[in-house]
C-alpha cells in the first residue's frame, strides 16, 4: 500500500452526548422486554405516523421491526445469518427485504438481538409505505402472534405537482390516522389524550428541528461528527421511538456540543482531508468501513437517511427546511383532527416529494439532484453509493444517479450487497479493494503519522 | 535505476523489470492456486536471471493484482487500475480508456494523458470470473480455449445465453448441449455472452471515445475481441502482451516512487 504522511491533524475529542444516547437506546429495548411487567401494550408493525402515538395513550410501546433488524445485522453476523436461514427454511425467498429476513427469523427462532426471547406483541398497527414488502410484514407479524391488527393504505403519486391531488391525499392520510387512533382506543380500552399527544408532537418537531441544525453544522470543515457515530443517534426519536422528553434533551445536547465543536474546529475525524457523501442506509453489518476510510483521511458526511435535505439559500449557505411550528404560517393545533392533519403532513404523506424532510423515496431523477446538492452543501469530493439486491435503495436510479454524477466529474464508487441488513451477497475483501482503488485513483494513499 | 513490477492474479502471475525506463525482462507463469506467493517469487527470480541482474540490483519492487499482499519481497503495492493505466499509456500512448479483462475481473477506466483516472468501474459481482468462465466452458465442450475461439468463428448462428452470471450461463450451456446444439454455436454463444458483459461494464463508465485499449489475458481471445469490437462499434487497440500492462505499470510507478 502506498503511504502518505498526514498533512494536517485536527483536534478531536470524545463525544460527550454518547453516554446519554447509549442509555436512551438501551432503555428503549429494556422497555420492550419489560412491557408486560409495566402493563404496557407492545405494538408491532412499523412504517407510519402511528409510531408516535405513545404519549397520547400513555401505555403503548411501539417497536419498528426495521431498526431492530438493522441492529441484528450490526450486532452479530452469525446470529443474523441464523435468523435469515430460519426465514428461508420456512419458505420465504431470498429476495425478501433483508430486514424482514432478519426480523421474521428472530420471531421464528425466538431470539432477541440483545439476548433473551422475543417479547410477544399484543397488537399490530402497520403503517403505510410504498415498498411492496414493508406493509405486508405487519400482517405476517399479526398472524405469527395471533393478535388483532390494523392497517392503513399507502398513497403514492410521483407525477407533476397536483394541488388538488395533494389535498385529497393529505385528507385520506389524516382520516386514516384518526381511524388508527380510534382502533387503538378500542383495542386497548384507553382514551386518547389529545393534549398530551399535541404536547409530545411539539417536542418531536423541536427534536426534528434540532436534527436539522445539527445536519447544517456538518457542512463545516472539519466535520464535527463522524458518520458511524451519527448513525447511532439519528434514528432515536424517529424510527426508534425513544421517550420524547429525553430524546429532546439528547438532541439539545447534541446541537450544543456540535456548535461548540464547530466554533472550536474540533473534528469528528482528526485526519480529515477528503469528504464523501452517500445515500440510503449503510451496510449495517459493515460499519467498520467508515473507520477503514479514515486511514486515508476520508470521512463520510451526511446521508439522506438522516431525514434532512438542506436547501441552498440566496447567500450561498445551505439550511434545513423550517419545521411547521417555527414557520410564520404555523398551523394552530387544538383538536384531534388538527393533530392528525398536522402529523400526517409532517410525515410527508401528503406531498413527500417536496417536503425537504424524509430520506428515501424521492422521484427517480431527484436522486441525482439530491446527491449533487449534498456534494455542494457538504463540500464533498466524491460519492459512494450502494447497489442492494432488494429492499431499501433497490432502485434503478441509484446507478443512473452515479453515472450522471460521473459525467459532472464527481468520482463515484458503487458497492454491492443483498440489503443493508443482509450480507449474503456482500464480499468484504472486494469492497475493501474497491475502497483502496477509489482512493488511490484520486491520488490518495493511506496515511501514517 | 532498476525497478520491478509483480502482478499477481487469480490464474497467472506476471513480472516486469524496468531499467532506466526500458523493459529489460518480463515473464508470466501460473499462479499455482494456493501457492501464489511462491509462484511470484519463482517468477521474479526467473526474470532477474533473464535480465542478468540480482535482487540486490533492484531499487524498488511494487506488487499489484488481487494477490499483491502476498508478495513479501515487494517494497510497496498499488491498486490494479492505477497500475493498468500507467502500463496502458506506455504500451498505447494515445489510449484514453482501458478495458482490462482478466480471469476474475473486468475493469474499465477512463483517464487523461497524464494518467489521472476520471471514471472507473468494476464488473458487478454477478459478472465476475469471465476469464475463468471461458476456460470452464471450453472444458465443458471438451476443447482448449484456443479451439473454443476457432469454433466460435465457424459458427453460423447462436442463441443468446445468460450474460449476467457465469453460473447461470453455464447452466444455459448445459441446456444447449442437451438440445444437441452444434458445438460451434455454443462456443459463439459463450464468446458473445462474455462480450456482452464486458460492454455492459464499459457502458457504466460513460466511455465516449474510440481510443480504447484492451488489456488482460482475455484480450488475447480473438473471438471475444471481435465480438466486443462489434458491440462497441470501434476497433480497440491491443498491445503485443496485453496481460503484462499491470506489472509494467507497477514497475514504472516504482521508478517514480524512488525518484
Image (cartoon, rainbow, N blue to C red):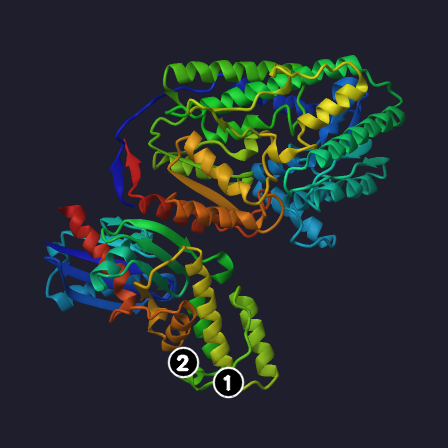
- Compare residues B247 and B227 and report the one nearer the observer: B227
The image shows residue A193 at horizontal and vertical percentages of: 81, 15
Query: Quick check: can you spot residue B11?
Result: yes
- Compare residues A339 and A447 and report the one nearer the observer: A339
Crowdedness near tag 2: few (<14), some (14–19) or many (≥20) residues, C-alpha within 10 Å? many
Q: Are marks 2 and 1 on the same chain?
A: yes
Q: Can you identify the residue that label 1 sits on? A: B183
Q: Is residue A352 above or below residue B206?
A: above
Residue under the point 49% across and 86% down: B156
Left or right position of A437 against B53: right
Q: Is residue B229 above or below residue A240?
A: below
The image shows residue A249 at horizontal and vertical percentages of: 59, 13
Crowdedness near tag 1: few (<14), some (14–19) or many (≥20) residues, C-alpha within 10 Å? many
Q: Chain of mark 2?
A: B
Residue under the point 54% across and 48% down: A397
Q: Which mark is residue B149?
A: 2
Q: Quadrant of the C terminus of chain A?
A: top left
- Compare residues B67 and B247 and report the one nearer the observer: B247
Q: Is residue A295 above or below residue A386?
A: above
Query: How many tags in the picture?
Result: 2
Residue under the point 57% across and 43% down: A420
Badge 2 element: helix
Left or right position of A90 against A240: right
Badge 1 element: helix
- Compare residues B142 and B116 and report the one nearer the observer: B116
The image shows residue B138 at horizontal and vertical percentages of: 45, 78
Amino acid at each position: 500500500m502506498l503511504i502518505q504522511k498526514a498533512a494536517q491533524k485536527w483536534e478531536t475529542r470524545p463525544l460527550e452526548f454518547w453516554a446519554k444516547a447509549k442509555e436512551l437506546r438501551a432503555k428503549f429495548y429494556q422497555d420492550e422486554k419489560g412491557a408486560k411487567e409495566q402493563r404496557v401494550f407492545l405494538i408491532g408493525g412499523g412504517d407510519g405516523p402511528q409510531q408516535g402515538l405513545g404519549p397520547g395513550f400513555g401505555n403503548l410501546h411501539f417497536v419498528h421491526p426495521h431498526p431492530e433488524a438493522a441492529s441484528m445485522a450490526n450486532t452479530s453476523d452469525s446470529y443474523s445469518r441464523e435468523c435469515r436461514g430460519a426465514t428461508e427454511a420456512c419458505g420465504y425467498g431470498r429476495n425478501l427485504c433483508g430486514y424482514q429476513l432478519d426480523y421474521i427469523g428472530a420471531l421464528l427462532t425466538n431470539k432477541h438481538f440483545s439476548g433473551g426471547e422475543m417479547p410477544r406483541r399484543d397488537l399490530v398497527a402497520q403503517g403505510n409505505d410504498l415498498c411492496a414488502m414493508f406493509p405486508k410484514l405487519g400482517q405476517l407479524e399479526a398472524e405469527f402472534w395471533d393478535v388483532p391488527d390494523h392497517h392503513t393504505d399507502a398513497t403514492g403519486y410521483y407525477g407533476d405537482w397536483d394541488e388538488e391531488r395533494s389535498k385529497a391525499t393529505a385528507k385520506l392520510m389524516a382520516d386514516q390516522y384518526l381511524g388508527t387512533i380510534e382502533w387503538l382506543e378500542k383495542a386497548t380500552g384507553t382514551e386518547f389524550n389529545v393534549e398530551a399527544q399535541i404536547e409530545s408532537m411539539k417536542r418531536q418537531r423541536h427534536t426534528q428541528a434540532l436534527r436539522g441544525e445539527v445536519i447544517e453544522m456538518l457542512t463545516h470543515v472539519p466535520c464535527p461528527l463522524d458518520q458511524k457515530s451519527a448513525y447511532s443517534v439519528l434514528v432515536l426519536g424517529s424510527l426508534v421511538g425513544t421517550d420524547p422528553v429525553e430524546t429532546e434533551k439528547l438532541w439539545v445536547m447534541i446541537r450544543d456540543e456540535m456548535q461548540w465543536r464547530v466554533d472550536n474546529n474540533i473534528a469528528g475525524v482528526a485526519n480529515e482531508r477528503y469528504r464523501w457523501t452517500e445515500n440510503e442506509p449503510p451496510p449495517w453489518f459493515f460499519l467498520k468501513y467508515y473507520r477503514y476510510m479514515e486511514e486515508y483521511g476520508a470521512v463520510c458526511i451526511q446521508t439522506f437517511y438522516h431525514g434532512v435535505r438542506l436547501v441552498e439559500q440566496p447567500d450561498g449557505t445551505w439550511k434545513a427546511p423550517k419545521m411547521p411550528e417555527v414557520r410564520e404560517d404555523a398551523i394552530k393545533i387544538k383538536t384531534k383532527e388538527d393533530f392528525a392533519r398536522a402529523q400526517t403532513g409532517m410525515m410527508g404523506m401528503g406531498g413527500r416529494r417536496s417536503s425537504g424532510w424524509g430520506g428515501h423515496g424521492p422521484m427517480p431523477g431527484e436522486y441525482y439532484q439530491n446527491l449533487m446538492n449534498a456534494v455542494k452543501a457538504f463540500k464533498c469530493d466524491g460519492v459512494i453509493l450502494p447497489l442492494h439486491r432488494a429492499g431499501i435503495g433497490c432502485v434503478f436510479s441509484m446507478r443512473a444517479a452515479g453515472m450522471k454524477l460521473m459525467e459532472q466529474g464527481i468520482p463515484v464508487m458503487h458497492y454491492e450487497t443483498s440489503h443493508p441488513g443482509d450480507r449474503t451477497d456482500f464480499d468484504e475483501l472486494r469492497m475493501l479493494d474497491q475502497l483502496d482503488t477509489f482512493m488511490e485513483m484520486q491520488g490518495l494513499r493511506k496515511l501514517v503519522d | 535505476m532498476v525497478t520491478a513490477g509483480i502482478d499477481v492474479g487469480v490464474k497467472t502471475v506476471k513480472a516486469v523489470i524496468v531499467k532506466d525506463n526500458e523493459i529489460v525482462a518480463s515473464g508470466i507463469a501460473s499462479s499455482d492456486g494456493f501457492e501464489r506467493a511462491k509462484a511470484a517469487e519463482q517468477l521474479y527470480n526467473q526474470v532477474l536471471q533473464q535480465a542478468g541482474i540480482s535482487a540486490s540490483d533492484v531499487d524498488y519492487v511494487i506488487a499489484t493484482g488481487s494477490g499483491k499482499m502476498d508478495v513479501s519481497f515487494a517494497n510497496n503495492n498499488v491498486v490494479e487500475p492505477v497500475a493498468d493505466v500507467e502500463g496502458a499509456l506506455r504500451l498505447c500512448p494515445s489510449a484514453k480508456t482501458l478495458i482490462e479483462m482478466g480471469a476474475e475481473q473486468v475493469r474499465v477506466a477512463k483517464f487523461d494523458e497524464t494518467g489521472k483516472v476520471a471514471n472507473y468501474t468494476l464488473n458487478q459481482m454477478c459478472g465476475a470470473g469471465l476469464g475463468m468462465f471461458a476456460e470452464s466452458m471450453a472444458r465443458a465442450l471438451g476443447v482448449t480455449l484456443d479451439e473454443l475461439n476457432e469454433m466460435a468463428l465457424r459458427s453460423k448462428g447462436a442463441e443468446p445465453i445468460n450474460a449476467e452470471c457465469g453460473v447461470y450461463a453455464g447452466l444455459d450451456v448445459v441446456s444447449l448441449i442437451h438440445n444437441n446444439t452444434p458445438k460451434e454455436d455454443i462456443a459463439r454463444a459463450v464468446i458473445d455472452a462474455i462480450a456482452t458483459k464486458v460492454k455492459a461494464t464499459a457502458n457504466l463508465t460513460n466511455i465516449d471515445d474510440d481510443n480504447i485499449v484492451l488489456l488482460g489475458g482475455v484480450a488475447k481471445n480473438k473471438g471475444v475481441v471481435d465480438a466486443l469490437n462489434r458491440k462497441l462499434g470501434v476497433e480497440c487497440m491491443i498491445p503485443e502482451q496485453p496481460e503484462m500492462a499491470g506489472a509494467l505499470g507497477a514497475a514504472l510507478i516504482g521508478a517514480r516512487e524512488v525518484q
